[in-house]
Image (cartoon, grey):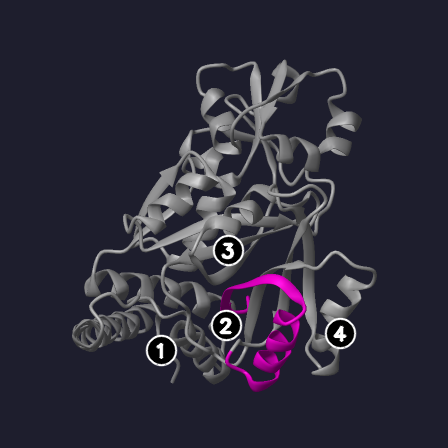
């Protein structure tokens, strides 16, 4: 005989009670793991990206539904975030202010139970982690529409920080204002990258409305609070934070608009089996130097996923290359290829081996 609604609700209450009991049981084990980590290495990262990826992969594979697998990722991100805070307070520095896409990327990676530290520049993010005032830092590195963030690349030249992980964040721009009415908009403000990513939509729909560049999309939203004639191009989170209404959602010209972020740490990430290695190197100035440089990766069957060049800023016409390859520096093929490449360089630095975004 089918159950009635009160019986189903009673069953849900019983299951919820059991979930709470199990979460607390899980938390006791997490606290003990944290204690053992500190005994082994007082300065070790308590956050282990490889272990997180392993848990999510195992649970989504076990899931038979109807609970959606993508929701498992979100639920366990928060469970692991809360668990990590039980081991020790975790501080994550990021390019602020709140409600920027960098902030959203942080929350995607670390959940809501860590202490977020918004700073004013990419350099400050590096400084917070280098000085030990933050366990991790999060900085943008490239966007599918606007390309690479050169300032982030330049910071790695003199920094000893490691790349600990990467985050791929979808960038969806909304036109926001206090009233939510397009006809009241006399000015549009946003970060220069956001304005560029919405250029075609703005020219088609609001060609005669002036645009103003500001420090961030979140700052643009904040400025609309006391100015009903201003609109901001910002995230949905920024709109919620500052009490703005959506005039038009998803106005970015490229709907496949993603920004890649890097997670910075003083410590290396552990090997997971699905990793990426980032290198910084300078080549000798001779004909065919770049070809000779890349040949070992091909000969060892290693896929190179990215290469960018930047002026060294130390000598005219000298360039530094940033290269991403698939695999971990401890993988036999990768280490052999890197050694061969190193012999052909003026200098080389391994920026980090870390879990590839999945």
Residue 172, quarter of picture: top right
Rendered-image quadrant of the C terminus? bottom right
Distance between the alpha carbons at the discs numbered 4 and 1: 67 Å
Residue 3, numbered circle: 1
The numbered mark, 2 or 4, whose residue comes first in the sequence reads: 2
Distance between the alpha carbons at the discs numbered 2 and 4: 41 Å
The numbered mark, 4 or 1, whose residue comes first in the sequence reads: 1
Does the magenta portion include 344? yes
CB atoms of marks 4 and 3 within 8 Å: no
CB atoms of marks 4 and 1 within 8 Å: no
Rendered location of residue 278, percent (x, y): 57, 64
CB atoms of marks 2 and 4 within 8 Å: no
Observer-side mark, 4 or 1, equals 4
Query: Where is 333 relative to 38, above or below?
Result: below
Residue pointed to by mark 2: 69
Query: Where is 356 relative to 40, above or below?
Result: above
Residue pictured at 44% horizontal, 74% vertical: 56
Observer-side mark, 4 or 3, equals 4
Rendered location of residue 39, percent (x, y): 16, 75
Residue pictured at 46% horizontal, 66% vertical: 71
Observer-side mark, 1 or 2, equals 2
Residue pointed to by mark 4: 295
Residue 123, quarter of picture: top left
Residue pointed to by mark 3: 262
Observer-side mark, 3 or 2, equals 3
Does the magenta portion include 221? no
Task: Give the extent of the magenta segment.
Answer: 330-358
The numbered mark, 4 or 3, whose residue comes first in the sequence reads: 3
CB atoms of marks 1 and 2 within 8 Å: no
Look at the numbered disc 1 and give the secondary structure of its residue: loop
């Amino acid at each position: 005989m089918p159950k009635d609604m009160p019986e189903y609700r009673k069953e849900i209450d019983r299951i919820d009670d059991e979930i709470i009991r199990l979460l607390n049981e899980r938390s006791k084990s997490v606290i003990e793991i944290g204690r053992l980590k500190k005994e082994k290495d007082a300065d070790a990262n308590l956050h282990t990206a490889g272990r997180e990826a392993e848990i999510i992969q195992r649970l989504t594979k076990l899931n038979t539904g109807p609970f959606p697998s993508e929701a498992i990722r979100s639920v366990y991100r928060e469970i692991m975030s809360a668990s990590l805070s039980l081991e020790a307070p975790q501080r994550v520095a990021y390019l602020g202010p709140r409600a920027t896409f960098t902030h959203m990327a942080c929350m995607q990676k670390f959940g809501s139970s860590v202490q977020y530290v918004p700073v004013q520049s990419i350099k400050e993010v590096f400084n917070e982690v280098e000085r030990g005032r933050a366990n991790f830092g999060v900085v943008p590195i490239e966007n599918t529409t606007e390309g690479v963030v050169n300032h982030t690349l330049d910071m790695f030249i003199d920094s000893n920080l490691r790349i600990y992980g990467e985050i791929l964040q979808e960038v969806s721009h909304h036109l926001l204002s206090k009233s939510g009415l397009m006809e009241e908009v006399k000015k549009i403000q946003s970060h220069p990258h956001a304005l560029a990513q919405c250029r075609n939509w703005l020219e088609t729909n609001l060609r005669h409305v002036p645009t103003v560049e500001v420090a961030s999309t979140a700052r643009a939203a904040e400025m609309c609070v006391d100015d009903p004639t201003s609109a901001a191009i910002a995230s949905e989170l920024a709109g919620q934070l500052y009490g703005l209404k959506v005039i038009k959602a998803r106005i970015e010209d490229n709907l496949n608009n993603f920004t890649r972020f890097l997670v910075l740490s003083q410590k290396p990430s552990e090997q997971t089996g699905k990793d990426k290695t980032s290198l910084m190197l300078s080549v000798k100035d001779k004909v065919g130097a770049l070809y000779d440089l890349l040949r070992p990766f091909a000969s060892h069957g290693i896929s190179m996923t990215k290469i960018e060049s930047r002026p060294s800023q130390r000598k005219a016409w000298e360039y530094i290359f940033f290269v991403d390859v698939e695999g971990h520096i401890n993988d036999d093929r990768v280490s052999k290829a890197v050694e061969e490449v190193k012999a052909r360089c003026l200098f080389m630095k391994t920026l980090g081996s870390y879990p590839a975004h999945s």
